[in-house]
Amino acid sequence: MKMRKYNPVTLATGLLVLVIFLAMLFCFQVRQTEVVVVTTFGRYTRAIAEPGLKFRWPWPIQNLHRFDNRIHNFEKHYEQTTTRDSKTILVDVFLGWKINDPKIFLERFNGDMKRAEEGLEVLLRAAKNSVIGQHPLSDLISPNPQDLKFSQMEQEMLNSIKPSAKESYGVEVVALGIKQLGLPQGVTEKVFERMKAEKDLLVKQYQGEAAGEAIRIRSEADLEKERILAEAEKQARIIRGQADAEAAKYFKTFEQDPEFAVFLLKLNALEQALKDRATLILDTRTTPFDVLNSKQEVGTGKRQGEQP
C-alpha cells in the first residue's frame, strides 16, 4: 500500500488557518478606549482595561463584553424646578460619566448604555431639584456677578450624585454643570422688574456717594483757597510794609529839597513816556514836558536870570 504524499504548500496553508482559528478562539484584543469584561458560564470572572493581546477560554465557556471606557456626555434638557423662594425656573443640566466598576455596570444594566443613562437621569433630577430647592433665585439670576453661585450649586449636585452613581451603577461622574437657564413668561417679567429695581437702587446709591464726594472736594478746595488767599494777603502786607519803609527813606531826602524832588519825578515820568519810539505833539508847558523848556535851577528854587 502506497502512502499518499501531501503538497508542503497545502500543509503550511492548512496549519496557518488552524493557528488563526485557534487564536480567534483563545485570544482577543483590548483597545485603549475600552474595557472588556470576561464572564465564565455567564458569571463575572475579570475586567481588563489594559490594552493589548489577552487570552481566554473559547465560547461558550467564556464570553466577552466590551464597553467604551471614554467619558460620555449626558444632557437633561429643560425641566421645571422650584427655588427656595418658590420661583419656578427651567434648568438644562449636563454631566460627564465613565464606567468605574465594570462588574457592577454589567450586572446592573447588562452593558446597555441607554439603560445606564436612564438610571443617571433619575439621580440627576433628584440632585438638581434638591440643590436648587435650597437656594433662592438670586443665586442664579442677579445683576451683580459676585452674588451668583453657579459653581457652588454645581459642586453640590456633583457631591450628591457621585456616591450613588458609583455604588449602585458602577459609574463615575467626572463633571456636572448647569448649561442653560430659562424662565416662564410670568417669572421673566417679575425678574426683570426686580432687576430694574436693584439697578435703580444702585444708581441712587452711587449718586448719593458722588454727591457726598463732591461736597467733600468742594469743602477741601474752599479751605485751600482761603489758606492761599490768607497767605497771599500776609505776603502783600509784608511787601507793602517794606515798600513803605523804603519810600519813607526817600521822602525824608525829598523833604530837604522839594523842588529837586519834583524835578526828579518829572524826569522819571518823561523817561517812561519816551521809552518807546513815538511822536508826540504837546505844549511844552505840559507836565512833565515842561522840564525841557524850563530854566529853573534845580535845588535852589530860583530861575536863571532872576535876582536874589
Image (cartoon, rainbow, N blue to C red):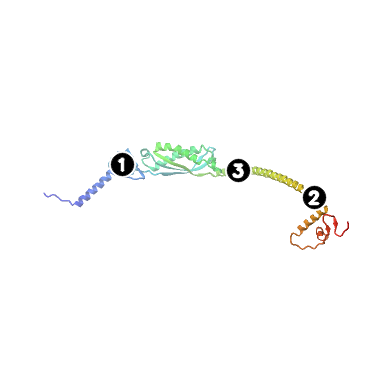
Residue type beneath disc 1 = Asn
Q: Nearer the viewer, residue 15 or 119?
A: 15
Q: Are marks 2 and 3 in contact (CB under 8 Å)?
A: no
Q: Which residue is mark 1?
A: 63
Q: CA distance from mark 1 to mark 2?
A: 134 Å
Lateral position of residue 213 relative to residue 289, left or right: left
| Separation of marks 1 and 3 at Cα, in angstroms | 68 Å
Front: mark 1 or 3: 3
Which residue is denoted by mark 3 in the rendering? 202
Q: SS for tag 1?
A: strand
Q: Nearer the viewer, mark 1 or mark 2?
A: 2
Q: Residue at x 76, y 58 (%)?
A: 271
Q: Tell me the mark number nearer the camera, choosing from 2 and 3.
A: 2
Q: Is residue 292 above or below residue 45?
A: below
Describe residue 2's horizontal placement relative to residue 300 as left or right.
left
Q: Disc number at residue 253?
A: 2
Question: Which mark identifies residue 124?
Answer: none
Dot 1 or dot 3: first in sequence order is 1
The quadrant where residue 136 appears = top right
Q: Is residue 24 above or below residue 167?
A: below
In the image, residue 257 lies at what x, y percent?
Answer: 82, 52
Q: Quadrant of residue 216?
A: top right
Asked if disc 1 and disc 3 are in contact, CB closer than 8 Å, the reply is no
| Quadrant of the drawing holding the C terminus | bottom right
Decide if residue 211 is on the left or right side of residue 22: right
Q: Amino acid at mark 2?
A: Thr
